[in-house]
Image (cartoon, rainbow, N blue to C red):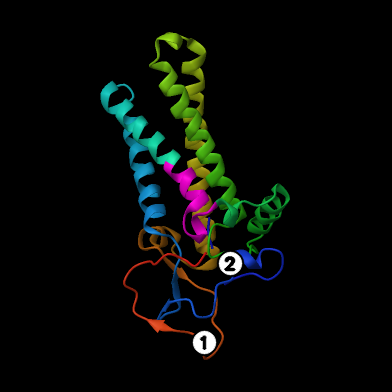
Amino acid sequence: MDAPAQTGAHAGRDARPASAARSRDGRIAVWDPFVRIFHWSLLTLFVVAYLTHDLSETIHQGAGYGIAVLVVLRVVWGLVGSRHARFRDFVYRPTAVLRFLIATARFKAPRHVGHNPAGGAMVLALLLNIAVICGSGIMMTMDRFWGQKWIEEVHETAVHVCIGLIVLHVLGVIAASLEHRENLVRSMVTGWKRGPAAPAGEQRSIEPTGPSEPAP
């Protein structure tokens, strides 16, 4: 659920210098390599862990530990990473998220270059939920919690909640892609998105060779 720059309270989050590198068709580099690798690696490992739950404990646990490492790295990158990867770029107040959801329901939501308010809230919800899945999964392997039914219930419930969040995330991506006429899935592969309109005479036209790190 991502998405020219806004005016008003959130303009500073999406505004970019006019001299920022652009492709000839007006696209700009938004998602850095780490964000893209994290996104698709997390999805892959989650699917592997889910499908191997009753088939291979070794593969299931290996995928789980891999997910835990990814979550820790994403939290660190949310503090020190590139512009649109940082939490401060996409964490909004609950009221802003609610207003955005209402606007989305009316197909009148403003477009954001980075994560929009609902997308930012989803990132936080998924990270927290997956942390619970990983934490409870690790506890299930410890002697102290071995056989504790409540740990298993927390783990399974968190997995089901995560699947629900993923469904909502996909629906949000589809809605934003249709409303703003851009392929958000492709942008998470290439790192490039349609940028805000540049003032006449100030746009630099370049050939895209791959996403560069957004200006801080």
Residue occupying image coordinates x 50% and y 18% = 153
Location of residue 132 in the rendering, given as x and y in whole percent from the top left corner: 50, 29
Residue occupying image coordinates x 54% and y 67% = 180
Residue occupying image coordinates x 38% and y 42% = 42
Q: Residue furthest front?
A: 80
Amino acid at pointer 2:
Asp
> Is residue 172 highlighted in magenta?
no
Label disc, if present, on residue 202 of the rendered structure: 1
Callout 1: SS: loop
Left or right: residue 95 compared with residue 54: right
Q: Which residue lies furthest to the bottom in this view?
A: 201
**Mark 2 closeness class: few <14, some 14–19, many ≥20 residues within 10 Å:** many
Give the residues drawn in magenta, as a range.
Answer: 73-86
Amino acid at pointer 1:
Glu
Specify which label sits upstream in the sequence, 1 or 2.
2
Residue occupying image coordinates x 53% and y 54% = 86
Q: Quarter-wise, where is residue 56 in the image?
A: top left
> Which is nearer the eye, 205 or 98?
205
**Mark 1 closeness class: few <14, some 14–19, many ≥20 residues within 10 Å:** few
> Which is nearer the eye, 73 or 8?
73
CB atoms of marks 1 and 2 within 8 Å: no
> Looking at the picture, does residue 38 appear above or below residue 147?
below
Say whether residue 115 is visible.
yes
Say whether residue 56 is visible.
no
Give the residue number, with chain letter if any, for mark 2: 14
> Is residue 75 highlighted in magenta?
yes
> Which is nearer the eye, 193 or 78?
78
